[in-house]
Amino acid sequence: MTDAIIRFDKVVKRFGDLTVLDELDFEVKKGEKVSIIGPSGSGKSTVLRILMTLEGIDGGVVYVDGEPLWHELREGALLPAGEGHLRRMRSKLGMVFQQFNLFPHMTVMRNITEAPVKVLGLSRKDAHLRAEELLDLVGLADQAKKFPHQLSGGQQQRVGIARALAMRPSILLFDEPTSALDPELVGEVLTVIGRLAEEHDLTMLLVTHEMRFAREISDRVCFFDRGQIREEGTPEELFTDPSEDRTREFLKAILD
Ligand SMILES: Nc1ncnc2c1ncn2[C@@H]1O[C@H](COP(=O)(O)OP(=O)(O)OP(=O)(O)O)[C@@H](O)[C@H]1O
């Protein structure tokens, strides 16, 4: 038995001839905050996209909350999952995207309440009350009636975070949430993510090129290279005393 809420067990992912994940073993414990860093093209975003059921897998098994994500156990055999199973499993996870992905024609409030009403079946009133709490949490209580184009990138990303939280996921995934932002707007988004990291029950998995997050907020940092975890440890261990040459080279290039 393991207390992992996310477990990749020898997961293989290919795009044509390209093997992006090569029998990847990877675990995240409940409540843990984990950063994935590594060179471009090493498969970091693919890990998140598989968890969000946006990409299938070609081998191995992914477990979320103790259940196979891409498979269903039927009569003792692991068979490909049906749409109902995927939908149920997907509801455990929320994702914050690099490009915010807000609905441009909807107000901030509507962006946050739409899925809870349509997917979770919440009443408009309950969804609205919850959205107000979340807007407060991300420091945007006075922006509910605005449209995305009336907000800065940092504000849009904070709406993106509120929107993901509105679905009450137990796991929150972040795919380079600050890389589309002007440098002066990164801090406000990091502050909100840092606040969320104090929530013990929320599991967070973050792909980032922003070493401040990896350093300050995560319990564990994983260095990805060519579809494998080459090295992992606490931020202290990985940033101050990496044991692998590849990690050292990567950190030197990114921190110089
Ligand atoms: N839908 C796709 N079709 C074909 N190749 C893909 C697809 N998605 C990703 N890839 C390739 O898979 C590899 C891993 O992509 P992925 O986005 O996971 O990398 P990454 O580590 O997140 O990179 P980056 O830091 O640049 O975002 C890359 O070589 C990419 O070009």
Image (spheres, rainbow, N blue to C red):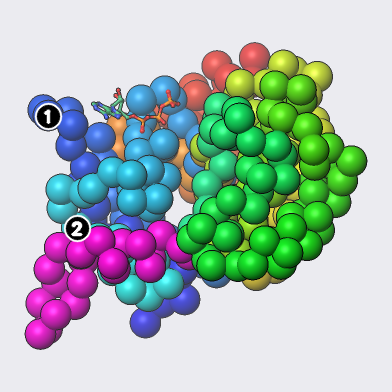
Give the mark toward the camera: 1 or 2. 1
- Give the residue at x 54% y 54%: 115
Crowd band around label 2 with a 10 angstrom C-alpha radius: few (<14), some (14–19), many (20+): some
Query: Horizontal and vertical percent for residue 100?
Result: 59, 32
**Residue 157 visible to the viewer:** yes
Residue in front for this viewpoint, 180 or 140? 140
Q: Is residue 9 left or right of residue 92?
A: left
Q: Amino acid at mark 1?
A: Gly
Q: Amino acid at mark 2?
A: Gly
Crowd band around label 1 with a 10 angstrom C-alpha radius: few (<14), some (14–19), many (20+): few
Q: How many marks?
A: 2
Image height of 152 relative to 141, above or below: above
Image mark for residue 16:
1
Residue range (magenta):
71-92
**Residue 210 visible to the viewer:** no
- Give the residue at x 71% y 39%: 108
> Is the CB atom of the residue marked by disc 1 within 8 angstroms of ligand 1's nearest atom?
yes
- When asked about the image quadrant of residue 148, the answer is top right
Q: Where is ligand 1, by quadrant?
A: top left
- Give the residue at x 57% y 42%: 96
Mark 2 highlights which residue?
Answer: 60
Question: What is the C-alpha distance between the residues marked 1 and 2?
Answer: 18 Å
Check the picture and name the quadrant holding the N terminus. bottom left
Sequence order check, earlier mark of 1 and 2: 1
Q: Is residue 245 left or right of residue 77?
A: right
